[in-house]
Image (spheres, grey):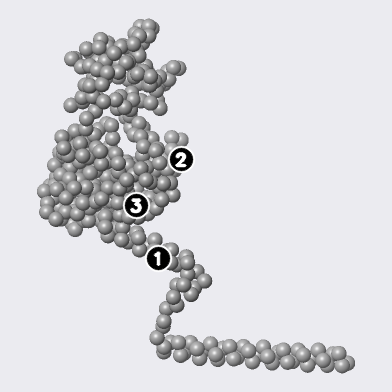
Amino acid sequence: MEERSGCWWVGLVAMVALIAGAVGGSIGGATAAYFLSKAPVTPTPAGELASGATQKVTLTEESAIIEMVKKIEPAVVTVVSKLPRTIELFGRISEETATGSGVITDKRGYIVTNQHVVGDSQDLSVILSNGERKSASLVGTDYPFTDLAVIKIEAEGLTAAELGDSDQLVVGQRVIAIGSALGDFRNTVTAGIVSALHRTWSRTDILMEDLIQTDAAINYGNSGGALVNTAGQVIGINTMVIRGGEAGERVEGIGFAIPSNTVRAIAQQLIEKGRVSRPFLGIAHETLYNLPAKQGIYITRVVLNSPAARAGLRQGDILIKIDDDTIDSEHPFLNLLMKHEPHEEVVLTINRAGKEMKVKVTLAERE
């Protein structure tokens, strides 16, 4: 009986304490809420928060991106290209246009963009970041060797982007892409990282080499826009994005940019002389990579008075090597040719009617 009484008494005390605590908590909470609603709020310093370190890092990263965008945005433009064809819309015939992006790299009005943005254009114009529209002229392109072109506008007070050193990039480094997404959304900013370096991608009969791979969103209209590091330097010119695999699978987050060091070298030559100094052999060809040997190119035509003609190359010859480099799908003819300089002598290995032979030829400069 005493034991049961003791248990009852302890239970009663516990119950009273719980009720008092609940009431007191409610009253205290309400009172605190009342006075806090009347008092000024003083933010708790980040250093006093349990997650203070994370908050500091996040704020620092956000600030860096904001400053980066402020720095680069005035140098990124929309490129409008009037194409040599028309379209019929609602019973009316109108000229077809294409849009892309570009980056002002010289205050004199020189703008770097992609060749595929301006290559077919009959008329070019540029929309600056402030909405002002300017007529543009084509200075030159580096087709088909790189997807780069330079155009020029006449304007005062332009902001030129700073080209960084793309050789210093590391995988995992944060970057942003900025350009005219879909042509209408000017100066769209997307963030990502450097996913890989030194990538290759096939374009016609050439492999575009040494590309930067990024997962920053690149949409139609972003071509020719800037890929930027956290210092606000352009470290690449966005050029393409993969949207689907060979088997039709959906692909996301694989875009490519041409490194800034390549951009700098190509743009300088285009500005100075309107073209890039490239070696010239003087043949038309078809690849033989799908044959069992998986190497060599079939010469379909030899240009009159070209280095190939002077060296005695003929239609029907199979060109196998340039010096010691074998021509195959991973080492296309044009890529191997570009390893050499104009006026350089090289040794070509050819197969003529089943007989292998070597021919010396002095390369010319492509005009």
Give the position of the C terminus as an image quadrant: top left
Circle number at residue 249: 2
Marker disc for residue 59: 1
**Disc 2 or 1, which lies upstream in sequence?**
1
Image location of residue 325, percent across then percent down:
38, 21
Q: Is residue 136 above or below residue 318?
A: below
Are the two marked residues, 3 and 2, in contact with CB atoms closer than 8 angstroms? no
Badge 2 crowding class, 10 Å Cα cut-off, few under 14, some 14 to 19, many 20 or more, is few
| Image-quadrant location for residue 114 | top left
Relative to residue 360, is residue 231 depicted above or below? below
Mark 3 crowd level (few <14, some 14–19, many ≥20, 10 Å Cα): many
Q: Residue at x 27, y 44 (%)?
A: 224
Q: Residue at x 27, y 11 (%)?
A: 313
- Looking at numbered disc 3 in the image, what kind of residue is underneath it? Asn
**Residue wearing tag 3:** 229
Marks 2 and 1 sit apart, C-alpha to C-alpha, by 38 Å
Position of 186 with respect to 336 (left or right) is left
Mark 3 and mark 1 in contact (Cβ < 8 Å)?
no
Q: Amino acid at mark 1?
A: Leu
Answer whether residue 85 is visible to the viewer in this image: no
The residue nearer to you, when weighing 318 against 276, is 276
| Cα–Cα gap, marks 1 and 3 | 17 Å
191 sits to left or right of 18: left
Q: Nearer the viewer, mark 2 or mark 1?
A: 1
The quadrant the N terminus occupies is: bottom right
